[in-house]
């Protein structure tokens, strides 16, 4: 290996993997290192999708997280760098066969290689033999915008997932994982960054425009993210302001590319996070990349009005718009699936987290309603969205 990495501390843990802060051993340049344990074919397929999507972006957009390198762990202290453009055939075979158990000859090879220590692997110690399922990443700074009136999600509403949680996985633990080395973002995710600071209208506009640019870039490459939410947007703090980075491509899908500004491929898997899923996804219908535009609309509305909610079992606020049903909250996509003619009240003007920014102007409210349309074809395509945001902000400033 030409580059050696050292782990510093754990900065995030979810149901699929663990993220560490680390640095290059020689230059001390900080990086984020994500360990994805390969325990079953379903999870491995998600990891390969994430790797393929991140390689496709190839560090070509400032608002998409950059992948520096990828390594395959074949033993407790044995790491093998993957060549650019190549996929680990052993993992691809596991997905196709529906099993992660290697043939006996490979098992002996893995056991033999685990006895050898390489210089690179000794610097890359594995402290995460078992990944526990947690709904939220630990260590997040609690928002200063916390308010006792913050609405809560009703109990016993299951979140939809496209793969089984690790508590549901069976079989012996294999010492095999993918390590993704990515750029490090010191501002945390979008929830942490915005809710730990007083509201700033210009900052909010900046975030919205950057997200438009990122999604237009991804859709132009034929990448549908399918899980856009504040948790999956990371922030780099710079003297000129925040630079946001779309991350976590585990549920993404790649197509041939956009035609007339739109990705025409249809998907059928119900996946994502409930507060940001489009109505057609909620309904189990076939959907396109326009579902990403709906997710962006939910995020934009929440960012511009500082709308928050509490997920079941959590005490940390999250940015997200919703519909109030009695004393409970209903995700916008679910509400619009039940009633396609539902009239959304933008700006919301209530149930917002103080201190409050000024509400969005009429032009931006119109754009938000278009992004949140029940009909996917009525939503603006990603390649037009950035120009429409600029136009709406300019119109509202007069």
Image (cartoon, helix red, strand yellow):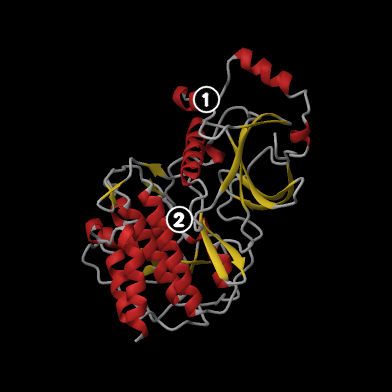
Tell me which corner region of the image, top left, top right, bottom left or bottom right, holds residue 128: top right
**Front-most of 111 and 118?**
118
Q: How many marks?
A: 2
Judge left or right: residue 64 versus residue 339: right
Q: Residue at x 39, y 65 (%)?
A: 298
215 lies above or below 315: above
Q: Nearer the viewer, mark 2 or mark 1?
A: 1
Q: Residue furthest bottom?
A: 398
Disc 1 marks which residue? 89
Secondary element at image label 1:
helix
Residue, x 32% and y 75% (percent of image)? Answer: 365
Q: Position of residue 43 (x, y in %)?
A: 51, 36
Q: Label 1: how many residues lie within 10 Å, few (<14), some (14-19) or many (20+)?
A: few
Q: CA distance from mark 2 to mark 1?
A: 40 Å
Q: Quadrant of the C terminus?
A: bottom left
Q: Residue 3, how many percent across, how many down?
A: 70, 40
- On residue 292, the disc is none
Residue found at the very far top of the displayed protein: 105
Residue identifier under label 2: 156
Against 240, residue 228 (above or below) is above
- The residue lying toward the viewer, choosing from 192 and 123, is 123
Residue 1 appears left or right of 361:
right
Residue 316 visible, this angle? no
Relative side of 13 to 96, left or right: right
Q: Earlier in the sequence, mark 2 or mark 1?
A: 1
Q: Residue 183: in sight, yes or no?
A: yes
The answer to the question of whether label 2 and label 1 lie on touching residues, with beta carbons closer than 8 A, is no
Residue 20 location, x and y as percent? 67, 49
Which residue is at the front of the view, 12 or 52? Answer: 52
SS for callout 2:
loop
Q: Quadrant of the N terminus?
A: top right
Badge 2 density bin: few <14, some 14–19, many ≥20, Cα 10 Å: few
């Amino acid at each position: 290996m030409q580059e050696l990495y050292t782990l510093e501390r754990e900065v995030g843990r979810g149901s699929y993997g663990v993220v560490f802060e680390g640095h290059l051993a020689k230059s001390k340049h900080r990086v984020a290192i994500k360990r994805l344990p390969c325990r079953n074919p379903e999870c491995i397929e998600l990891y390969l999708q994430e790797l393929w999507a991140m390689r496709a972006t190839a560090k070509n957009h400032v608002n998409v997280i950059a992948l520096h390198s990828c390594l395959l762990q074949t033993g407790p202290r044995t790491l093998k760098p993957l060549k650019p453009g190549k996929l680990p055939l052993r993992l691809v075979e596991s997905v196709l066969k529906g099993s992660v158990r290697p043939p006996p000859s490979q098992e002996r090879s893995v056991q033999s290689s685990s006895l050898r220590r390489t210089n690179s692997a000794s610097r890359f110690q594995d402290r995460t033999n078992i990944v526990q399922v947690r709904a939220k990443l630990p260590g997040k700074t609690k928002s200063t915008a916390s308010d006792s009136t913050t609405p809560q999600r009703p109990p016993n509403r299951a979140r939809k997932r496209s793969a089984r949680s690790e508590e549901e996985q069976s079989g012996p633990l294999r010492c095999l994982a993918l390590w993704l080395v990515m750029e490090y973002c010191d501002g945390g995710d979008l929830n942490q960054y915005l809710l730990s600071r007083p509201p700033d209208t210009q900052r909010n506009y900046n975030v919205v425009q950057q997200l438009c640019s990122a999604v237009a870039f991804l859709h132009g490459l034929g990448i549908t993210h399918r899980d856009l939410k504040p948790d999956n947007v990371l922030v780099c703090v710079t003297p000129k302001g925040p630079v946001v980075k779309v991350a976590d491509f585990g549920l993404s899908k790649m197509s041939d590319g956009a035609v007339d500004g739109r990705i025409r491929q249809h998907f059928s898997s119900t996946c994502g996070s409930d507060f940001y899923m489009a109505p057609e996804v909620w309904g189990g219908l076939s959907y396109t990349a326009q579902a990403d535009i709906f997710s962006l609309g939910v995020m934009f509305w929440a960012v511009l009005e500082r709308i928050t909610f509490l997920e079941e079992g959590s005490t940390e606020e999250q940015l997200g718009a919703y519909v109030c049903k009695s004393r409970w909250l209903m995700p916008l996509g679910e509400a619009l699936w039940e009633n396609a003619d539902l009239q959304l009240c933008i700006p919301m003007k209530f149930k917002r987290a103080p201190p409050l920014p000024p509400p969005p102007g009429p032009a931006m409210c119109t754009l938000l309603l278009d992004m949140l349309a029940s009909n996917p074809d009525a939503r603006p395509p990603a390649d037009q969205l950035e120009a429409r945001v600029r136009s709406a902000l300019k119109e509202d400033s007069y």
